[in-house]
Image (cartoon, grey):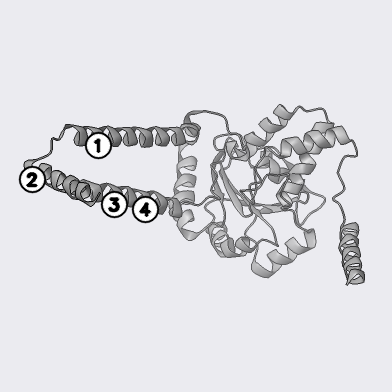
Amino acid sequence: MRKLLVLLLGLILAGTALAKEATPAVPDPALEKRAVKLEEQLRCLVCQNQTIADSHAELAMDLKKEIREKLKAGMSEDQITQFLVARYGDFVLYNPPVKATTVPLWFGPFALLFIAVAGLFYYLLRRRHATAQQPLSEAEQARVQALLDASGERK
Amino acid sequence: MLRARFLIPAAIFILLVVVLGIGLTLDPREVPSPLIDKPAPPFNLTQLDHPDKTISQKDMLGKVWMLNVWASWCVSCREEHPTVLALARSGVVPVIGLNYKDERADGLAWLARLGNPYQISAYDHDGRVGIDYGVYGVPETYIIDKAGVIRYKRIGAVTPEVVRDKILPLVKELNGNA
């Protein structure tokens, strides 16, 4: 049993050892770090719910190459972001800027929350008024009395 | 009072269904392009069938033209191919191809087999020009006016409806005004 486990573990480790790590396009670790940080904020347009950093789509690979070359050439993160937005639009940004077309995106959820909270308050207020201000009718009064008496007798 | 209690959730439900229903009819791949009404990005590439000759967007200045991004490996390109071919043969608008991330031999074989709608195909082997044009899903189609400004972009296959409702009226308008 133990031998089997060791064998299994060995096989698992062998698998990871064989798996080829993606070789970074730039050997410079500082630049690589900047590139990855930037790629994590950019959307891959082919597989729309992944970042460029996560994606292995052809276009994402090309863009990774492009970003690294641009960083190497001395372009700043902002400049590269501008470059991509000019071509693919704000949609490439996972953190889109606040402007007329993105107002519903930024403030829509808060508006919905506000409406929901207002609705809840309105409902609660109305209910409190309804219960507090309605005196019991005579029939109800009698019923309450009967119930109280009944529970009193049981003791 | 009792009626409101049932009607309000029902109304909210119907509203939600309508909103989600509208959402279903939208295509998330159709991202509005920031390139509309901007000058077509410059390129200077070799021609697919003549590696010694080049083509640039400048060669098309003064004409309303269509740039169609295609590749031999692209499935939707085959889907739109008869439509593009018919449009090119009608002679309404010159069609220039951008052969995107393809091998020269594969691209030429594809055209030989299915027919060539393109006056010229530019050969964008590494996809650099594709990035400049914001290409992310082949096929993509651009209508560029006489001044070299992009006026329309279609992402995905060109259908006969798109040709009839969008491309033909736009080409007519652009040719008439300038």
- Badge 2 vs badge 4, beta-carbon distance below 8 Å: no
* Residue located 13% across and 35% down the image: A135
Say the numbered circle drawn on residue A127: 1
Point out the tag, 1 or 2, that comes first from the N-terminus: 1
Q: Both on one chain, marks 4 and 1?
A: no
Which disc number belongs to residue B17?
4
Relative depth, front residue between B11 and A140: A140
Q: Nearer the viewer, mark 4 or mark 1?
A: 1
Q: Are marks 4 and 3 on the same chain?
A: yes
Q: CA distance from mark 3 to mark 1?
A: 21 Å
Q: Which residue is mark 2?
A: A139
User: Which chain does the residue under circle 2 lie in?
Assistant: A
B100 in relation to A94, above or below = below
Residue type marked 3: Ala
Identify residue type, mark 2: Ala
Tell me the chain of label 1: A
* Residue underneath mark 3: B10
Category of crowding for the residue at label 3, using alpha-carbon neighbours closer than 10 angstroms: few (below 14), some (14–19), many (at least 20): few
Comparing A39 with B127, the one in front is: A39
Q: Residues within 10 Å of mark 4 (few under 14, many from 20)?
A: few
Q: Position of residue B90 (x, y in %)?
A: 52, 58
